[in-house]
Amino acid sequence: MADSKEKLFPEFPPVSTQQWMEKATADLKGADFEKKLVWKTNEGFKVQPFYRMENLEGLKSIDSVPGQFPFLRGIKQNNNEWLVRQDIQVECPKEANAKALDILNKGIDSLGFRLKADNLNAELIETLLEGICAECVELNFTTCQKHVVELANLLTAYFTKKDYDLKKLNGSINFDPMSKMLAKGKERIDLTPTAQALLEATKPLPRYRVLGVNALALNNAGASIYQELGYALAWGNEYLHRLTEAGAPAAHVAKSIKFNFGISSNYFLEIAKFRAARMLWANIVAAYNPECDCADGSCDCGCGACGCGDDGKCDESCDCGCQDGKECTCGCQDGKGCRCAARMHIHAETSSFNLTLFDPYVNLLRTQTESMSAALAGVESMTVSPFDKIYADINEFSERLARNQQLLLKEESHFDKVIDPAAGSYYIETLTVSIAKQAWELFLATEEAGGFYAAIKAGTVQTAVNESNQARHTAMAQRREILLGTNQYPNFTELTGDKKPVVCACGCKSHEGCEPDFPTLNIQRAADQFEALRLQTEASGKRPKAFMLTIGNLAMRQARAQFSCNFLACAGYEVIDNLGFDTVEAGIEAAMTAQADIVVLCSSDDEYATYAVPAYKALNGRALFIVAGAPACMDELKAAGIENFIHVRVNVLETLRSYNAKLLK
């Protein structure tokens, strides 16, 4: 047998970081290393082009173990199972029940019901849950915030009537007045007394989490990853602080909180975000020194059933992951407070910020990578949004695809088998610490300013997130942030037809008094402005034709024609590419024959000095003339009357808006 210490490929000598840096610097041929290879994230920290083992030196996070405090590597110990969730808007309880029973046979094991408060009664609950085994599926409920206690009482009564073991039921009631404040700019309910009443009403349901931290709202509003995490921590701490001050046990409050995060398309940073979230939240809860209350059945490790409190050992009935006869790993016996309470329970949902109206099947690629990152990061449940969520009524086809995206990760890719496979990755471990630092600083700043509730009332949360939203829209307009099919590589021939984006309404029965008392979140999607531009073009009934006058250097004219086609098609223009012309006069004649509204001269920078002015004069104002590029002779060309230049440094959105203003009169 080979020596276990034998190194693979000994013929290759080790290469130091300094040697890598020297090689990279040499290959850059004088270009600035920082500008070319170092990426500055929206979170404000820099990402290096490569990481090595030495980057992990001094990081305490790499010593974490799955299922153990501070839960950086997850709260699971035996596998990476998560619940596949689908939400149902309840208009008719009988129809909602039929749909729920149907999708339970198609891979769903977590149901979400959105209930109207007007119809809330015992009969509705019985009809809605008929035939659904509450011990076999997670049940989640959302209703008007003023009626959550009523809902809790109805559910408790129903489960008792059905003779369920209430300590085994898993689910949630989404009480979260602060997300409504962010969305509406109004405070419509007193948080603390309602939360107290809700905690009291759900005592018989110890595994029901009823205090919602809906950081998904921040994600959908374009928040950066560290903002979503930092504010989510402050959000959860607001519940902890208020309710413990009111006399509720810290362990009870912590075990009643459910975190609902969004998932952006930043694959590796999202994995790191969830890992950092669990670690930071565990330390926040630990600071309250929660006393163990496992005996009530709320302990997630199952201690209420195994009797760990007697001698610190587990028997065969314990489902906390301990092996028979071994010390209990839930941490409740170490004198440091209830570790079970420090576990962050995460539901993740794919983002709507980056969903697009045009080229909508690309949304499937976005939601797939998002769900992959959340699964690898070890979330407890997940919702994948249908690809057509932003423009279509709910339909079985898109819902089936959304379900199957998660099922494929489980059944074919086996993402549910391995816990935290990212552990030990030089890159992801470093990202985890970097995001944790940024989020922790934001959390501390929010707490020092009075806490999350005070920050909402002051508008600081909304202002910060809206600034991030605006920055990302600016990056979109300048193509520094790419949405495939929207601001880069659009489908040249696509028309929306009857598809129109869903417009978010206030939801009030009357618009009187809807004016916000404090700022609200801007939930404008990243693609909204480009979509509005393209919809404007389509609605005008006149689709401008953009003709590529390709001439001169073959490589440059082809590259610039492709760039220009992609550029102008983002506004919905018809683009006409060409193989090349011998003279600009021949190109102009062909453009006029094609009835072009735009003529784009595509050549090399050096040749523009020769071709641009003659082409411009030959066109003689019969169409909009554009030069593709930013040649050194630009000032001379402008002096000759040429006004329009498109290149990588222009604002694509503003440029296309100006063209629409000229062409769609």
Image (spheres, rainbow, N blue to C red):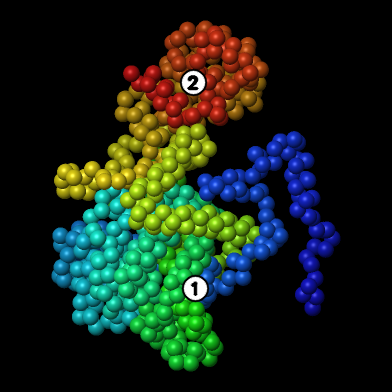
If the image is split into quadrants, where does the N terminus sit? bottom right
| Residue 651 in view, yes or no | yes
Task: Give the camera-side residue of 384 and 528.
Answer: 528
If the image is split into quadrants, where does the C terminus sit? top left
Residue 66: where, in percent of width, then height? Answer: 54, 72
Residue 574: where, in percent of width, then height? Answer: 43, 26
* Residue 76 image label: 1
Q: Is residue 143 left or right of residue 643?
A: left
Q: Is residue 487 left or right of residue 179?
A: right
| Residue 270 in view, yes or no | no
Task: Give the camera-side residue of 544 and 274.
Answer: 274
- Which residue type carries mark 2? Phe
- Which residue type carries mark 1? Lys
Residue 644: where, in percent of width, then height? Answer: 50, 18
How many angstroms separate mark 2 from mark 1 (CA)?
59 Å
* Residue found 34% across the figure and 80% down from its top: 168
Label 2 or label 1, whichever lies nearer to me, is: 1
* Residue 106 image label: none
**Which secondary structure, mark 2?**
strand
